[in-house]
Amino acid sequence: MVWEVLFVFFIVLFGGFIQGASGFGFGLVAMGLLPIMFSLKDSTLLVISLLLVASVSILLKIYKYIELKGLLLIVSSALVGRILAFFVLNTYGEMDFLKQVLGFFLIGMVFYLYFSKANSSTASAMNPFTPIVLGLLGGLIGGVFAVGGPFFVFYFLILYSDKHKYNANLQITVVLTCLFTIILHGINGDFNSTFSIYFLVGFVGVYIGTMLGLKWFEKLPSHLIRKLAMIMVLASAVNLIFFS
């Protein structure tokens, strides 16, 4: 039990640092490692709960940069995606084959993030079709695998050139979707007493990591942080595919 607690603590500590320094990445890091020890469902619920903590911590520092006009479509469609994800996770969340699916998806995300560049025009982000599709995918993938952040990142990088506006609107989207998922699973009785132990340990780890990451947000090159996170996620994905 002690080693399991320490395992959770250091994973979420590093994930929180990545989240604070780059605006996203906690789910990618944590979901690459936690399913080694827990079922996919338990890992997802823990990561989503701790992601809420990380995002709220960041948002309290930059909330003044929130712009509601860019949120309505993407948040609304993301919540629809979370409803779909709720049923998928409850039906298949205890089955080990989803860990392999997660592994392949994480590898896809790593390659996408490595090769993609946010060079699309702002006009494409303002097309209603773009936030609806990205929101639905981010909500669904985020609700099942807790790694839907890149879909939201892509949208807000297109929409905002100012990194504070990008980060603030990204975090409020994550907060709303995570809170919605927690309410759905809470009503369904999916949280148990063991979960609370790991959540409390993770709360401390993710808060410390996020605060450290925020201190580096202004000065550390984000591409270096993301490359480190991608290497870890890639290694973890291979482990999930071949050894879980």
Image (spheres, rainbow, N blue to C red):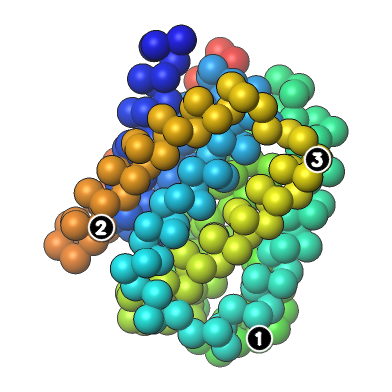
The disc at residue 214 is 2
The picture quadrant where one finds residue 206 is top left
Q: Earlier in the sequence, mark 1 or mark 2?
A: 1
Residue 210 relative to residue 185: left or right = left
C-alpha gap between disc 3 and disc 1: 36 Å
In the image, residue 28 sits, relative to residue 41, either above or below, namely below
Question: x and y percent of residue 86 in the render?
Answer: 78, 46
Could one spot residue 123 in this view of the protein? yes
Residue 192 relative to residue 175: left or right = right
Q: How many marks?
A: 3
C-alpha gap between disc 2 and disc 3: 35 Å
Task: Tell me whether circle 1 and circle 2 mark residues in contact (CB < 8 Å).
Answer: no
Identify the secondary structure beneath mark 2.
helix
Task: Give the labeled residue for mark 1.
Answer: 127
C-alpha gap between disc 1 and disc 2: 32 Å
Residue at 53% x, 39% y is 47
| Mark toward the viewer: 2 or 3 | 3
Question: x and y percent of residue 82 in the render?
Answer: 73, 55
Indicate the amino acid at tag 2: Leu
Identify the secondary structure beneath mark 1.
loop
In the image, residue 138 sits, relative to residue 228, either above or below, namely below
Comparing 96 with 192, the one in front is: 192
Which class describes the residues within 10 Å of circle 1: few (<14), some (14-19), or many (20+)?
A: few
Q: Quarter holding the C terminus?
A: top right
Residue found farthest to the left? 219
Indicate the amino acid at tag 3: Asn
Residue at 32% x, 49% y is 210
Residue at 34% x, 45% y is 207
Task: Tell me whether circle 3 and circle 1 mark residues in contact (CB < 8 Å).
Answer: no
| Mark toward the viewer: 3 or 1 | 3
The disc at residue 188 is 3
Task: Tell me whether circle 2 and circle 3 mark residues in contact (CB < 8 Å).
Answer: no
